[in-house]
Image (tube, helix red, strand yellow):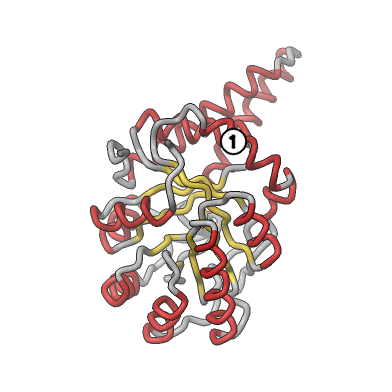
Amino acid sequence: MPVVSMKEILDRALAERYGVAAFNIVNDLSIEAVLAAAVEERAPVILQTSVKTVKQYGRAQLKGIFDTLVGGVDVPVTLHLDHCPDRTVISDCLAGGWNSVLFDAHELDVADNLKQTAEVVAEARRTGAHVEGEIEGIQGVEDDLGSDEASKIQSLEVAVDFISRTGVDCFAPAIGNAHGQYKQAPTLNAQRVSDLVEATGVPMALHGGTGLSDEQFTDLIARGCAKVNISTALKESFLKSSLEQLRAAQEKDKWDPPSLFRAQREAVFAMARQHIRLFGGSGKAW
Ligand code: 13P
């Protein structure tokens, strides 16, 4: 049974201090390539979908593709909805069998965010699903959501109170991280991760994974970032391999779609395997 709960995947990773790579897949090919990398590495893996991807496919069709491709996989996999401010989409994905959701209500004031996140947690529990919460925006626009402005950072007390009163299973703190490629190496508030984990025992989600250094990943995972999000690196490996392949096709005037798919698959597979290894997930499947 490859599909397991988000909480099980993350609680094990937190206890053993390794990171589970959470890739924002964009289509069937990228789902298959990421799953193949996880199988090769014997690693648990999280597949996450942006709201944009859910809307593009339609929830039922996307879940159908996931179910088909995960069918022959024998490592733990969980399906997560990434940043979603829309309660309708949250409810739809929970009803449709997603294992977890990030209810992204950071634009609300903390009291309203807390109230609504607690409602989402109660709703998720009814389908055996889990919830990631956040109270600060992660800088950078991704799949049409978010902002390039840095968000207001809440105090440790406010964050701890939010985590304990909502009952979220995972929390996404803003620590100087950002979605997309970093224009310059970020200075991260790693201590905030340690403080939050020590105060709550809840695993943290590291957003904005693309472009962090190996040392930053290793340090943050050791402090309790059990979920490590990678989106931009997947998009880049997918599209840059496509560009290379299409340029070669144009040069030869030979247009063979399976060659393109092979190049895309190889690039996404290699990108996923590299991150899984770096985060310490290899060999952690159960
Ligand atoms: P990157 O696009 O920087 O890898 O961030 C991914 C992410 O945090 C998805 O929520």
Q: Position of residue 158 (x, y in %)?
A: 43, 85
Q: Position of residue 107 (x, y in %)?
A: 62, 78
Position above or below: 232 against 33 = below
**Along the line of sight, which residue is nearer the eye, 258 or 248?**
258
Residue shown at the point (56%, 56%) measured from the top left? 180
Q: Position of residue 224 (x, y in %)?
A: 30, 62
Q: Residue furthest front?
A: 126
The reply to whether the residue tagged 1 has its Cβ within 8 angstroms of ligand 1 is no
Quadrant occupied by the N terminus = top left
Q: Residues within 10 Å of mark 1 (few under 14, many from 20)?
A: many
Quadrant occupied by the C terminus = top left
**Along the line of sight, which residue is nearer the eye, 153 or 169?**
169
Residue shown at the point (58%, 49%) measured from the top left? 97
- Please give left or right for residue 122 compared with residue 61 in the image: left
Residue 150 visible somewhere in the drawing: no
Residue shown at the point (31%, 57%) measured from the top left? 221
Picture quadrant of residue 108? bottom right
Picture quadrant of residue 102? bottom right
Position above or below: 265 against 253 = below
**Along the line of sight, which residue is nearer the eye, 221 or 122?**
122
Residue shown at the point (51%, 52%) measured from the top left? 99
Which residue is label 1 attached to?
Answer: 238
Secondary structure under the numbered disc 1 in the rendered image: helix
